[in-house]
Amino acid sequence: MTGVPYFRPNISEEEIELVASSLASGWLTSGPRVAEFEKSFAEAVGAKYAIALNSCTAALHLALIALDVGEGDEVIVPTLTFAATAEVVLAVGAVPVLVDVLPDTLAIDFDRVRSAITPKTRAIMAMHYGGSAADMHAAVAIREENPQISIIEDAAHAFPTRHELGMVGSIGDATCFSFYANKTMTTGEGGMLTTNDPKVAEHVRRLSLHGLSRDAWARFETRSSWDYDIVEAGWKYNMTDAAGSLGIGQLARSAEMAQMRRDIAARYDNAFADVAGITPRNGGEPARNACHLYVVRVDKQKFGVSRSELIALLGDADIGTSVHYRPLHMHSYYTKTYGYEPREFPVAADAFDEIVSLPMFPGMTHDEVDVVVERILNAKAS
Ligand SMILES: *Cc1c(COP(=O)(O)O)cnc(C)c1O
């Protein structure tokens, strides 16, 4: 029995061709392919504007600045998230105010968000854990009651994700997607910011290229003038045309790849339905979930084996796993800086002992799913 990797990239021949033709075209930096990718992505999520960047972290950073979050402001962040969601808040001189998550979905708990709001709160990082949408009804209601608060969606897991209010990418003030190697679609490294606000779009685009008055594509057009103005100090966060070409190809296959993920999730769900002590995370209605992660909780009392023991047993069988995430408040930086105790956010702390992310990627075969399931069921006996 061979092992199963946690993730395996899924790049088609057509996508390799697209990247090769882009390199051959002579456009190496942001050019026509990036423009095409942005247009198609905006259409796919139903947003007015999409700006391609070199990471989701860059998108989150610029979203904060464009929404006027800075020194001394507070931004509410779920503790169960990736490093970047809070680090960008620190990068603009604001304070990340952590809150707990919900036990079944592991998504940000908006009741906790409400209690964490102060006069200094300027934004909420709505993170769509695992690929299912956070409670955007609650997010929108909070924004309506508190006009000074912006909703920034960390949608690194959430393409394509649907919510009753629309596609993720069309709801918040700014939504940030990741095309990192192991996300639901990839450009190697890359990200996208979507918004319906023309001012935010224009500001983000300018900040992504040193704060210059026009973007590099326009600057190097044969007929354009050599002159530009530094309107404000910015960064270098733009996407290359080679990456944009890969994005165009991946986007065209995104519905098909999402369906493969949902099929895998359904097969796992079925297999674990009657297993005491293994509880799949509640990802809501399957058709709306991008299924970026397949997370189960392992209850040592009922299953007989702890989460950490299970990870070791799967590792022995060359089956890759991951944990999303050690909560931010249990990392030494946040403990030291803000004095958080592990029990301060008990739902996330309890989840951290029990969660494991199982292999999940488009192209994973049913046999591979069965190998993972079988090894887990055997763990109980061993
Ligand atoms: C991957 C990830 C990011 C960062 O994405 P990059 O494109 O690598 O910058 C941010 N937030 C979450 C929740 C992620 O999973």
Image (cartoon, rainbow, N blue to C red):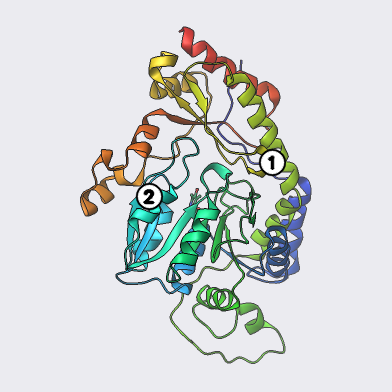
Quarter of the image for residue 246 reads bottom right
Q: Secondary structure at mark 1?
A: helix
Q: Position of residue 77 (x, y in %)?
A: 40, 54
> Which residue lies at the image location 69% right of the left edge and 42% below the top edge?
258
Confirm whether residue 182 shows in the render: no
Confirm whether residue 85 shows in the render: yes
Residue 287 disc label: 1
**Front disc: 1 or 2:** 2
Q: Position of residue 108 (x, y in %)?
A: 45, 48
358 relative to 253, above or below: above
Ligand 1 closer than 8 Å to the CB at disc 2? no
70 relative to 297, above or below: below
Q: Secondary structure at mark 2?
A: helix
* Three-letter code for the amino acid on which mark 2 is drawn: Arg
Nearer to the camera, 105 or 369: 105
Q: Earlier in the sequence, mark 1 or mark 2?
A: 2
Q: Position of residue 158 (x, y in %)?
A: 59, 49
* Three-letter code for the amino acid on which mark 1 is drawn: Ala
135 relative to 266, above or below: below
> Which residue lies at the image location 50% right of the left edge and 57% below the top edge?
139
Name the image quarter holding the N terminus.
top right
Q: Are marks 1 and 2 in contact (CB under 8 Å)?
A: no
**Total marks in image:** 2
Nearer to the camera, 235 or 292: 292
Residue 112 disc label: 2
150 relative to 44, above or below: below
Q: Residues within 10 Å of mark 2 (few under 14, many from 20)?
A: some
